[in-house]
Image (tube, grey):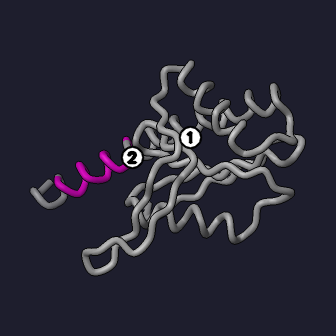
């Protein structure tokens, strides 16, 4: 094996490890979402689910930041400001909704958040149904 092949294998292994870590983290977040959904049901405002999710994940020893600020840059200047509901372990964005059904607008919102942050995974969680609806949006993997 030459140096170039060795380097490629190392990069592949790092990518695989990173994917596995992200998968484990998203599984934990989704598990927390089902716990919150089972306990609270539907019908509350988005902020209630945000607080409940932050509490549930924190109880599990997972770092959570609520109302995570996102800036969009163009030509070295800030051209837009957004706020994601949760940032989990500095690697997974979580966007919460309390609507009848998730659509393209909500998916695009998550994808734009990922593009602006250079993060790879956003979980879109909809608590507006009897059972939480989960969409996993992945960018650039």
Q: Residues within 10 Å of mark 2 (few under 14, many from 20)?
A: few
Q: Is residue 2 left or right of residue 115?
A: left
Is 73 placed above or below 42 here? below
Residue 80 relative to residue 11: left or right: right
Mark 2–mark 1 Cα distance, whole angstroms, equals 15 Å
Q: For the stretch drawn in magenta, what is the main secondary structure? A: helix
Q: Position of residue 19 (x, y in %)?
A: 44, 46
**Is 8 part of what is drawn in magenta?**
yes
Mark 2 vs mark 1, foreground winner is 1
Location of the N terminus (image quadrant) = bottom left
**On screen, residue 83 above or below 67:** below
- What is the magenta range? 7-17
Residue 106: x percent and y percent? 67, 64
Front-most of residues 77 and 26:
77
Residue at 34% x, 71% y is 78
Q: Residue at x 17, y 55 (%)?
A: 7
Q: Position of residue 114 (x, y in %)?
A: 47, 61
Say what secondary structure mark 1 lies in: helix
Camera-side residue of 108 and 84: 84
Query: In the image, which disc is placed on residue 26?
Result: 1
What label does residue 9 carry, if any? Answer: none
79 up-or-down from 84: above or below: below
- Image quadrant occupied by the C terminus: bottom left
Residue at the location (50% across, 61% down)?
A: 82
Tell me what residue is drawn at x 26 percent, y 53 percent: 11
In the rendered image, residue 126, in percent from the top left (x then y), is placed at 75, 49
Look at the numbered disc 2 and give the secondary structure of its residue.
helix
Q: Quadrant of residue 116?
A: bottom left
Instruction: Say left or right for 23 vs 39.
Output: left
Decide: marks 2, 1 in contact (CB < 8 A)?
no
Q: Could you tell whether 86 is left or right of 80 in the image?
A: right
**Residue 16 badge:** 2
């Amino acid at each position: 094996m030459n140096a170039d092949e060795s380097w490629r294998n190392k990069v592949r292994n790092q990518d695989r490890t990173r994917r596995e870590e992200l998968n484990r983290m998203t599984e934990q977040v989704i598990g927390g979402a089902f716990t919150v959904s089972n306990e609270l049901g539907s019908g509350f405002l988005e902020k209630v689910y945000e607080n409940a999710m932050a509490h549930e994940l924190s109880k599990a020893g997972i770092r959570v930041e609520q109302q995570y600020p996102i800036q969009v840059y163009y030509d070295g200047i800030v051209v837009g400001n957004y706020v994601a509901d949760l940032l989990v372990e500095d690697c997974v964005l979580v966007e919460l909704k309390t609507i009848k059904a998730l659509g393209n607008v909500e998916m695009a919102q998550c994808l734009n958040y990922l593009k602006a942050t250079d993060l790879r995974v956003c979980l879109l969680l909809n608590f507006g149904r009897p059972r939480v609806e989960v969409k996993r949006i992945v960018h650039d993997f």
